[in-house]
Amino acid sequence: MRDAGFVATLGAGVVEWLDPRSGERILDLGCGDGTLTAEIAARGCSVVGVDGSEDMVAAARGRGLDARVMDGQALVFEAEFDAVFSNAALHWMPDARKVAEGARAALRPGGRFVAEFGGFGNCAAIVTALTAVARQEGLPDELAKPWYFPTAAAHTGVLEAAGFHVERMVLFPRPTPLDAGMRAWLEVFRAPLFDVCGARRQAALDTAEALLAPALRDEAGNWTADYVRLRFDARAV
C-alpha cells in the first residue's frame, strides 16, 4: 500500500498521547506494517502487534516484531498489557462494543487505551460521492461506507460501557494532502466498491473523481482528503 504511507506518518500525535515508557507491555491494535509498532518498541517497550491482514502482519514480522493475525473484534488477551494502542484502525472495526470489551480484558488494572481513528464527519465528501456511485451502479450503500465514524459522545458511551473512564477525547479536522491523488486513494481504500463494477470500473472511478473535484481538488490540481479524527485516552476501571 505505497499510497497509504501517510497513515503512520500522521500517527505521531497519538503516540505522544500514549507516552510509552520503557518496560511497559503494549498491544498495538491494527498494527498494519508495524511502522508505529517499531517506534514504540524502540522506546524500550515489549510490543505485540495484531492485524486482520496477513500481508500486513508479514510486513510487521519482517521488521522483527511480534505480530499476529487477529480480528480486533475478537481479541483473546487477558490482563497482560499496560496499554492498548491503535492508530487509523478502529474505524475498520464496526463492532465497537466488542473492540472496547476486548481491549478492556487485555489490560491490567489501571491500564490505558489510547487511540486515534476516523470520527464523525470523516471523509464526508468522499462518502457522499461513493454513495452516489454505488446507487448509480445499483450497489448497496455499505460498499460506499464500511467504516465506523462515531461522535465523541457516542464513543465515550461505548468505552464507559466496557469499563473505561475517558480521561480526554477530542474530535478535530485534519485535512490531509494526497500526493498520489484521489484516484489512488479510492483504489487503495475502496477497491471492493470499484472491483464489483466490472467493466464499468474505470467509469465509476471517473464519476467519483468528478463529483469530488469541486470540494477536494484545488486550482493547481492538488487533492486533499477531508479527514476528521477522533483521539482518546481512556483508563481501565
Image (cartoon, rainbow, N blue to C red):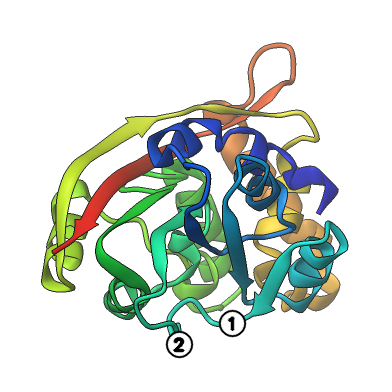
Q: Residue at x 63, y 17 (%)?
A: 218
Q: Quadrant of residue 170?
A: top left
Residue 9: name its quadrant: top right
On screen, 4 above or below 176?
below
In screen coordinates, is 219 left or right of 212? right
How packed is label 1: few (under 14 Cα within 10 Å), some, or many (20 or more)?
A: some
| Amino acid residing under circle 2 | Val
In the displayed structure, would residue 204 be above or below residue 42? below
Q: Position of residue 117 (x, y in %)?
A: 43, 50
Image quadrant containing the C terminus: bottom left
**Residue 94 or residue 191, whichever sits in front:** 94
The residue labelled by disc 2 is 76
Task: Report helix, strand or loop for mark 1.
Answer: loop
Residue shown at 56%/78% (left/top)? Answer: 138
Q: CA separation, marks 1 and 2? A: 9 Å
**Marks 1 and 2: CB-CB under 8 Å?**
yes
Q: Is residue 107 left or right of residue 44?
A: left
Q: Which residue is mark 1?
A: 70
Q: Earlier in the sequence, mark 1 or mark 2?
A: 1
User: In the depicted view, which residue is nearer to us: 5 or 38?
Assistant: 38
Q: Is residue 8 above or below residue 192?
A: above
x and y percent of residue 199 in the render?
85, 74
